[in-house]
Image: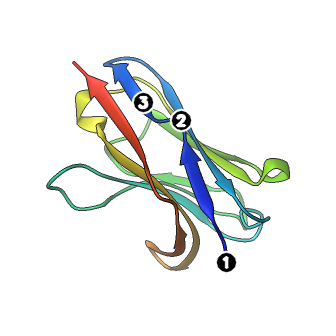
Amino acid sequence: QVQLVESGGGLVQAGDSLRLSCAASGRIFSTYNAGWFRQAPGKEREFVAKLQWTDGNTYYGDSVKGRFIISSDNAKNTVYLQMNSLKPEDTAVYYCAAGEYKVGEYLHWGQGTQVTVSS
């Protein structure tokens, strides 16, 4: 059973930066796509970023493009989400995912970490 554990969330001010981490129980990020999603209260889950394991290409949601960066450290079985120039609208629970079997659909999910950005 693959386990994903997110960390790094917290309360920050607008304009600040934060780095989220997603630690996996095994070496899955070297063979699976990794993704970050978020969900704000009363809203649907939103795609944030994806790291494609085959070629290292990255993809971002329009609302975070140019501000967020997804990366991985396969030796540590960890995927990161560097979030810069944070805005209040970035406030959400952020989820890590691995094992994309269909575009946007993942086998494994973390429990989520709260990010709150104050204005």
Determine the image quadrant of residue 31. bottom right
Give residue 10's mark: 3
Contact (CB < 8 A) between labels 2 and 1?
no
Q: Name the residue under label 2.
A: 8
Determine the image quadrant of residue 115. top left
Give residue 1's mark: 1
Determine the image quadrant of residue 53. bottom right
Q: Residue at x 53, y 59 (%)?
A: 35
12 with respect to 87 (left or right): right
Contact (CB < 8 A) between labels 1 and 3?
no
Label 1 and label 3: CA atoms lie apart by: 28 Å
Which mark is first along the chain, 3 or 1?
1
Q: Which residue is drawn at 80% across and 48% down?
A: 76
Quarter holding the N terminus is bottom right
Q: Position of residue 100 (x, y in %)?
A: 55, 75
Q: Is mark 3 on a helix, strand or loop?
A: strand
Q: Where is residue 85 in the image (x, y as percent from the top left)?
A: 39, 23
- Viewer-side residue, 107 vs 57: 107
Q: Is mark 1 on a helix, strand or loop?
A: loop
- At label 3, the amino acid type is Gly
Question: Mark 1 Cα within 10 Å, few/some/many (few <14, many 20+)?
Answer: few
Q: Which residue is drawn at 76% across and 54% down?
A: 77
- At label 2, the amino acid type is Gly
- At label 1, the amino acid type is Gln
